[in-house]
Image: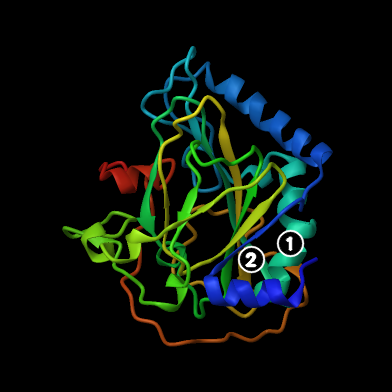
Amino acid sequence: MIEPWQEELFREQGFLIVNDVFSADEIAELQSVFDGWVDESREHAEAYGETLDGRHRFDPDSDHSAAHPSLRRVASPTEISSGYYQAACHSRMTGIAARLIGPGLRFHHSKINSKLPGTRTEVKWHQDFLFTPHSNDDLVTALLMVSDVTADNGPLQVIPGSHRGPLYSHWQDGRFRGAIDERHLAEQRQSPVSCQGTAGSVCFMHTRLLHASAANQSPRPRTLFITVYAAEDAWPLAGNPLPSVHERRIVAGEESGQVRCVSNSFALPEMPKGASFFEQQAGDRAG
């Protein structure tokens, strides 16, 4: 799986990139499934499909069209694809996540975030924990690179070590915006690290780590399959923003029957009303 020095690097930096977690054949299967969803999205002008809580599963950006598809989000793909379910719950990625925050590990939620060529999708600075608060912060976000992630196609930008710092408010002007007022990050934003890798690599990111990403400026897609895992003894303090039939399923280790609590102070998030958190970050009332 991974070496002890890699575990220590994750604890110190708050993120870890592991190459070749998935084979070329496994990635080809996942890419093929996603390509099918992109082709399907050409037939729709707005968000469509339905998830467990009645919200839309497929979320195109505002520049989406049949000729220029901009499918930016697929919610809970593990529910509609056996390949994505296997990748999230029964793979080397699952095992590595258990090494980082386990041994007991629960599935929390999954999604695909994609930036197709020439699209405008971007993500503002935020911390995942403020969307998915738990009784403790042993949560990890695993970002599987379904396509190559390069310097110019909108890679994840992180601030190393920021997971050991404060939790920043994601509320602005009395509304949950799912983003941090960037005036509070003036110093930290001076030295972000770009998380790049070839298809099949995985970036494991601590739930408190500050991160963002810019739009895709290249002719190549940037597609990530994102799975959030929680330690088995972490209990959710708010509703799941992407509820799934697989939520809280044990994917490594065993059930202990225990809840572990740590001291944190923060405002609870609002549940998104739209298809994804992109509406919240944009300040849309649908979000």
Front residue of 95/236: it is 95
Circle 2 or circle 1, nearest the eye: 1
> Residue 280 at what x, y percent from top left?
32, 48
Going by the numbered disc 1, the residue's amino acid type is: Thr
- Which residue bears the numbered disc 1? 94
Write the residue at 73% across / 48% down.
85
Q: Residue furthest left?
A: 173
Query: Which of the 4 quarters of the picture holds residue 9?
Result: bottom right
> Residue 144 at what x, y percent from top left?
65, 49
> Residue 114 at what x, y percent from top left?
53, 37
> Residue 102 at what x, y percent from top left?
69, 76
Q: Residue furthest top?
A: 67
In the shown orientation, is residue 251 left or right of residue 56? right
Q: Residue furthest front?
A: 191
Front residue of 256/64: it is 64
Report if residue 265 is visible in the image.
Answer: yes
In the shown orientation, is residue 277 left or right of residue 105? left
Write the residue at 40% across / 48% down.
277
Is label 1 in a helix, a strand or a loop? Answer: helix
Q: CA distance from mark 2 to mark 1?
A: 14 Å
Q: Quadrant of the C terminus?
A: top left
Front residue of 87/151: it is 151
Label 2: how many Cα within 10 Å (few below 14, some 14–19, many 20+): many
Who comes first in sequence, dot 2 or dot 1? 1
Establish if 37 lies above or below 151: above
Establish if 60 lies above or below 281: above
- Which residue bears the numbered disc 2? 248
Report if residue 235 is visible in the image.
Answer: no
Establish if 47 lies above or below 175: above
In the shown orientation, is residue 151 left or right of residue 29? left
